[in-house]
Image: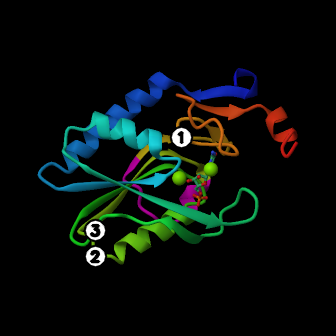
Amino acid sequence: MGKDLAKVLISEEELQAKVRELAARIDADYVGKDLLIVGVLKGAVMIMADLARAMHLPVQMDWMAVSSYGTGTKSSGVVRVLKDLDTDIAGRHVLIVEDIIDSGLTLSWLVNNLKSRGPASVEICTLLRKPDAVKVPIDVRYVGFDIPNEFVIGYGLDYAERYRNLPFIGTLAPHVYEHQGE
Ligand code: 5GP
Ligand code: MG
Ligand code: MG
């Protein structure tokens, strides 16, 4: 796995410190409220697990899986629900937990979808945000790191379903892309 990696962008220690900081902010903001955190599969698995364990509020956890139609690596904003929530969110405070916002198209669709179900509130927490996200008019309350426009892997994020289990965020060496499909 080591030879596939170009560089470590965010270390395990930096990730864990940031997750604790986000958890403390969320705890403070939702004190006295019944919070449901919604992880977007599969990328948000690591951030959800670490965030929830770092929080003190007795949160409820649920999951959604969505797939975004698009060409190559760009998402189109046309979204299909692969797994919906098990929870009725009417009247609930909902916090969407995402791994990364790039174009923001997937997330903006998701926010609108959840808002149509009559929740008390919908906010967003994302571990990573790329520069293009500024083009989308969605209000992201909790952001872990603003990163450059590079393809990143690890801590839930995949390249061809691999590297999700890395405990840090890194970038791939060019030879991994060059040998794509072999
Ligand atoms: P958006 O609709 O914001 O363009 O797409 C967001 C989704 O694209 C993320 O949830 C993630 O699955 C994928 N994505 C965007 N940028 C990256 C990246 O740098 N690395 C990985 N592994 N996935 C990414
Ligand atoms: Mg995601
Ligand atoms: Mg992916």
Place of residue 126 in the rendered image (x, y in percent of width and height, measured from the top left): 45, 48
Q: Which quarter of the image is occupied by the C terminus?
A: top right
Whole-percent x, y for residue 171 in the image: 68, 34
In which image quadrant can residue 116 be found? bottom left
Callout 1 crowding tier (Cα within 10 Å): few <14, some 14–19, many ≥20: many
Residue 137 shows in the view: no
Q: Which amino acid type is shown beneath numbered disc 2?
A: Gly
Mark before the other along the chain sequence, 1 or 2: 2
Q: Is residue 5 above or below residue 70?
A: above
Residue bearing the label numbered 2: 118
Quick one: label 2, few (<14), some, or many (20+) residues within 10 Å?
A: some
Q: Mark 1 against mark 2, which lies toward the viewer?
A: 1
Residue 33 got which mark?
none
Tell whether 42 sits left or right of 163.
left
Q: CA gap, disc 3 to disc 2?
A: 7 Å
Q: Callout 3: few (<14), some (14-19), or many (20+) C-alpha neighbours within 10 Å?
A: some
Residue 160 visible in the picture: yes
Residue that carries the numbered disc 3 in the rendered image: 89
Q: Position of residue 15 (x, y in %)?
A: 46, 30
Residue ID for mark 1: 156
**Taking 118 as reference, is 21 above or below it?**
above
Q: Earlier in the sequence, mark 3 or mark 2?
A: 3
Looking at this view, is 104 or 110 the one in front? 110
Image spot of residue 160 (x, y percent):
70, 45
Tell me how many marks there are: 3
Which residue is depicted at the point 63% across and 35% down? Answer: 163
Q: How is the image coloured?
A: rainbow
Labels 3 and 2 touching (C-beta < 8 A): yes
